[in-house]
Every structure is written in C-alpha cells, then in structure tokens.
Image: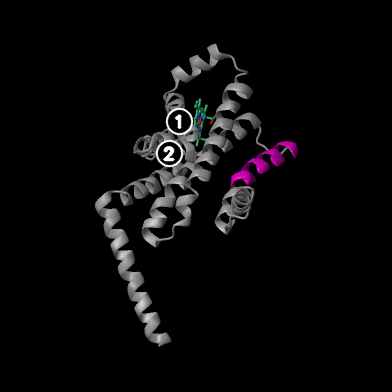
C-alpha cells in the first residue's frame, strides 16, 4: 500500500512539464510584473490608475481570446497539447479580469458602492463589463477536474458561456474606447482585430466546418507521410 502511494506521488510529481506550459506561465505573470515595474519606476501615464485599469483589461481580453485559440489549433494541426492548456489560459484571463475590476472598484472608486452603482448603470460599456465578469465567474470556479466530473455533460454546456463572454468582452473593449465596431469610428483598431479573430475562431468551430478541416488535415498528413516514407525507402 505504502509503495503504491509512493509510486503515485512520484508519478504525479515527475509529470513532464512541456515548453508550452512554461511559455504560458511566463506570459501569465510577465504583464503583471511589467505593470508593477512601471508603477515603481514611474513609467505609467499621467493617469496611472486608468493606465493600470486599461492594461489589466487588455490582458484579460487577450487571455480570453487565447483560451479560444486552443481548440482550432488542435482541429487544424492535430496537436493535442493546447487543449490541455485551455484551463491555464482561462484562469489567467480571470485573474487579470479580477485585478481589472478590483482596480476599478477599489482603487478608482474606493469601494464607494453608491458611486460605483451610479457609474455602472449610466454607462452601457460598464454594464457589459459586469455581464462579462459574471459569465466568467462560474467558468473559473468550475474549471477543475473535480467540477468537470461532478457536472458531467453539463460542464460542457456551462463552459459554452465562454463564447458569449468573449463577444461581450469585445463590445466592452470597443465601447470603453468610445468607439463603434460597425462604423469603425473611435479608437477601435485593437477590439476590431480581436473581434475579427474571434469571428474566425467561432466559425472554425461550426461542426461541418470543423469536420471538413480535420478531414483535410488528415488527408494532408497521410500524403506527407507517404511522400516521406517513399523518399526514406
Ligand atoms: C465588473 C466588471 C467590469 C467593470 C466594472 C469594468 C470596467 C471598465 C472600465 C471603467 C473601463 C474603462 C477604463 C478607462 O478607459 O478609463 C474598462 C475597460 C476595459 N475593460 Fe473592463 N470592466 C469589467 C470587466 C471586464 C472584463 C471581465 C474584461 C475582460 C475579460 C474587461 C476588459 C476590458 C478592456 C479590454 C477594456 C479596455 C481597456 C483599454 O482602454 O485599453 N473588463 N472596463
């Protein structure tokens, strides 16, 4: 019994760490370290709180989109590793979203709930931000294996909310920039690019397209394999 426990512990602790995992964790903490560095070396803009708030929001949005890139990468290349890294990307998104919201309610408005309520209800982009955050909350809480097993099929249905969260996030981003994604007015270049990319990621997920993409991939890889084995032979 003891030996079995030891073997399990050793197996768990010697699980191979991949280069993708290392890159994701570096990218996960680097922006925060950067913000802290800029804060202490006075490199933030004239309005440091707004600067921090905006940067945290941007990073949360990038991680949200990054978490949606994993499945299409797997479909288009057959590489399985990104699928295992979706959780880390999603949790980094949530971490930056929490810091973004905390900066807004704590640092910017000193937890003055009356004032915060007034601002949020006045501005559509803030309402959309709150909706995005509310959608992300259950996804982060239930992201563990334990919840996956407990919820079974419902886990997948629940986690489909990430698509809605991503769409709302792009709107929040564009409207926070006082822009219009459709007439392309205002400072909407980044939310526009993210929005187009998100559209591509969602289209690739449509079941017939997804099947077609993986069929094509399988055909190409088997052709490549045939050619390669001919040459080696
Ligand atoms: C309770 C929820 C939220 C509130 C109250 C909120 C509030 C705000 C505010 C006030 C701004 C404008 C900052 C400024 O320019 O002065 C902003 C911008 C932004 N927020 Fe949020 N937000 C929320 C949730 C989120 C979430 C969940 C995300 C991403 C996953 C997000 C991403 C962004 C982005 C990308 C910007 C634009 C930053 C820029 O100007 O570059 N927000 N948010």
Neighbour tally class for label 1: few under 14, some 14-19, many 20 plus, Cα within 10 Å: few
Kind of element beneath mark 2? helix
Q: Which residue is mark 2?
A: 149
- Whole-percent x and y of residue 31? 62, 43
Q: Start and end of the magenta stretch?
A: 28-41
Q: Which mark is residue 233?
A: none
Is residue 37 one of those drawn in magenta?
yes
- Image quarter for residue 33? top right
Q: Give the residue at mark 1.
A: 138
Q: CA distance from mark 1 to mark 2?
A: 15 Å
Give the side of residue 60 with respect to residue 183, left or right: right
Residue furthest to the right in view is: 41
Whether tag 1 and tag 2 are in contact, CB under 8 A, the answer is no
As drawn, 106 above or below 13: above
Q: Position of residue 214 (x, y in %)?
A: 32, 60
Select label 1 or label 2 by which is in front.
2
Is residue 143 in sight in this rendering?
A: no
Count the marks.
2
Q: Secondary structure at mark 1?
A: helix
Residue 177 location (% of width, % of height): 48, 34
Magenta stretch: dominant secondary structure: helix
Report the colour scheme. one colour
């Amino acid at each position: 019994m003891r030996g079995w426990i030891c073997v399990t512990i050793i197996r768990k602790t010697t699980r191979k760490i991949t280069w993708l995992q290392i890159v994701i964790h570096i990218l996960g903490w680097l922006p925060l370290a950067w913000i802290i560095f800029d804060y202490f070396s006075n490199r933030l803009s004239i309005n440091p709180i707004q600067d921090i708030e905006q940067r945290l929001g941007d990073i949360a949005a990038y991680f949200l989109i990054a978490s949606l890139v994993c499945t299409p990468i797997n479909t288009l290349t057959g590489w399985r590793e990104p699928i295992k890294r979706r959780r880390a990307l999603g949790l980094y998104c949530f971490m930056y979203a929490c810091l973004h919201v905390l900066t807004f309610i704590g640092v910017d408005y000193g937890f003055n709930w009356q004032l915060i309520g007034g601002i949020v209800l006045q501005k559509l982009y803030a309402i959309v931000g709150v909706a995005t955050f509310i959608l992300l909350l259950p996804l982060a809480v239930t992201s563990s294996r334990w919840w996956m097993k407990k919820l079974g099929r419902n886990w997948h249905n629940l986690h489909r909310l990430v698509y809605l969260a991503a769409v709302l996030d792009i709107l929040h981003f564009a409207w926070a920039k006082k822009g219009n994604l459709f007439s392309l007015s205002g400072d909407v270049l980044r939310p526009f690019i993210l929005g187009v990319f998100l559209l591509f990621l969602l289209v690739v997920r449509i079941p017939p397209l997804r099947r077609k993409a993986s069929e094509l991939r399988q055909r190409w890889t088997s052709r490549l394999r045939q050619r390669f084995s001919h040459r080696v032979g």
